[in-house]
Amino acid sequence: MTKNLDDSSKDAVLMPQEDYESSGAITYRVSADLKYIALLTQYKKGWRHSYNGTYLIYDVTTQTIDATLVTPDDTQYFVWAPSGNALAYVHGFDIYYRPAVNEDSVRVTFDGRSNYIYNGIPDWVYEEEMISSNNVMYFSPDGSYLAFAKFDDSLCQRINFERYDGGIYPDMQVVSYPKSSTTQPTSAVFVYDVTNNATYDVDPPAVFSSVDYLFNRVTWAKDDTFALTWSNRVQNESVMHLVTVNSGTQDTTSITDDQFYHSSSTGWVYQRRPHWIPVFANITVVDEAEYYTVLPKDNWQHLHLVSKNGRIPITEGEFTVTSESASYPSVEVYDQDTKKIYFSATKASPQHRHIYRNSVTPSEPECITCKYATMYEGRCDYISTSFSTDGSRVIVRCAGDSLPPLYLMAKIDHTQTDPDMVFNAEEELEMNEDLVTTVENTDVSTKEYGTFESTSGYTFSYQVWKPPNFDATRKYPLLIDVYAGPGYQRVYNGWSRGWSSRFLPSAMDVVVASVDGRGSNFYGEDFMHEVYKNLGVKEALDQLEFAEYMGNMDWIDETKIAAWGWSYGGYTTSMILANDGPAEAERKIKCGLAVAPLVDWRFYDTIYSERYMTLVDGNEDGYNGASVLQKLDNFPQSRYVLIHGTADDNVHFQNAARMESALVEKDIDFKAIFYADQDHSINVGNANRHIFKVLTRELARCFDMDVPSGVWT
């Protein structure tokens, strides 16, 4: 249904519930003119973000599904244009466009091919490490143009792995997957002119003409101009071009400036991805464009106003301007009339997120959402938002330690001088009242925060999950819950209901703790870049120092400390065991549980590995030092549990196989468990339930505890 925010009498049902349920759809998309609904059916999961399906088209006027308008089976992406009911989709790795939903499709590209040419959708490595989405297609605001990226994987090597869930012979899966320092995909950008049925080339970045480069992002600034960001291969340099489409001459013009070029001498650019989403303050004359973005200032990432005349810092101090994910530092919204800019930041503390407002000149940020921390105590310390395109309304997601998230919708008065009144007329969309009642009537773990001074010279932040009815006179076993990936954060004021944070403290009386060691985000660039070109080493040492610190607590049994992690956390867990000791009496960690761990950065993809490690040629010592396989001389006996899915497209089963082989050669006792046909998440069918029962059992054995009811002994 549609909801009229100003007049509820104008609310309208677009599609009756019974029609939606009978269609077999799992989600939907509504055309801009509200006349048609695309229904995703026959869903087939791809990789982390991608999926295929068939889109049925529902006519709102006739309340029927028109079988003649359906997209082909295995459509890889579908999008409505921003006006009318034009649409575009990708099928067979090629792009198709319909000027109207009931018109014939026009084929835009003709060379798409699995594992070779990708038009409008990313290949595996771009989807996972750069785009974090299933598409690289971008309509202009008026729908006149469709910018898109193309990836050529023809020269990339493939990873092969078998699936065993078919016939009497396994099926071989083949995926284009460039590993560190091997040939990577080439990228190009084009613009399709929907009026002239013509496709125009976009110039590649001249500054990177002599080196490999990466496509980053397209952001339309106005109807005929978009911002296009690129980076060099190792992602310590980034540049933005302003691309204008010239319909008359059927070509494009790209301009850039020294001020649009950014680099880092100490590590990778930005926080987790090498690009930003600019928000334009002035784009009337392209050559005089002004935009807001996030750039380093005095060791912290801050809001800047950028033009060819220079970069003006808008914020300053020891906090980070970021986005919810930190993947794409961005501005939330800019109000042209009042010249106010809204953004997310960690100003209260690295563990908090709130929305702040600044004027276009440097000033102290106003906290717009801090009022919710008082209104909903314990539930609004970590806030994210979704603003309407016109900046008149906002949806606020509140999260905190004590109770489940809540959702509000508010009007925005940009003219208000009182920060607490900028968001107003709030409507409570979802308070999760039933879940709140359940939590309040259940003995659940409690969360506390602390800091300690590390021998590295830094102050580390940590969090501790304690069992309900915690007794400080007792001795509890301790599990170090670790991820420790570069640019990430484990310690934050957010709701959690996971295995380690809730189940273990409540069901097994285990204390669970995490620390943000070197390499973590939101503690300054120097802190984050400490691990540059040397992944795995400092992270493991910091976790070991934290284990020793926690082991000195009166209520921790220092003989029963374990570590566990998944993916990068599994890698860090493995490195922790490899760096613990070396003498048996000196070991702090009794056992380690590693799920889907990487064991050597040579085995991982180009974009991620090279962002943090650069190329093997030039940093071979760094790669060797970061390899678990080369650190097994002091690896402990009978303390390592290795778990991996055989169909892991991300961290390949190759890692587990190589680790198993190396441990056998070193005559080290360990336990290995594999999950057939499971990918990196190990969550298809009963696998997720099964793996956490396995982890529970192995941890109980490590701590010499009884296995909880419902878990095999």
Image (cartoon, helix red, strand yellow):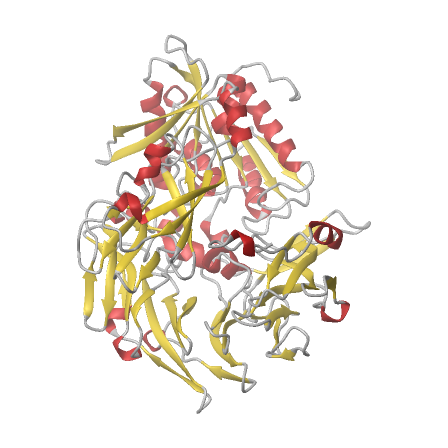
x, y percentage for residue 644? 59, 40
140 lies above or below 73: below
* Residue 713 located left or right of residue 231: right
Q: In terms of depth relative to the viewer, which is nearer, 482 or 539?
A: 482
* Residue 79 located left or right of residue 549: right
* Residue 702 located left or right of residue 490: right
- Residue 682 sits in quarter: top right
Q: In terms of depth relative to the viewer, which is nearer, 47 or 331?
A: 331
Q: In terms of depth relative to the viewer, which is nearer, 436 or 116?
A: 436
Q: Residue furthest top?
A: 473
x, y percentage for residue 566? 51, 38
x, y percentage for residue 32? 55, 66
Q: Residue furthest right?
A: 168
| Count of numbered marks | 0
Name the quadrant of the N terminus. Answer: bottom right
638 lies above or below 271: above
Q: Is residue 633 visible?
A: no
Q: Is residue 88 visible?
A: yes
* Residue 437 located left or right of residue 532: right
Name the quadrant of the C terminus. Answer: top right
Q: Residue furthest bottom?
A: 249
x, y percentage for residue 335? 31, 61
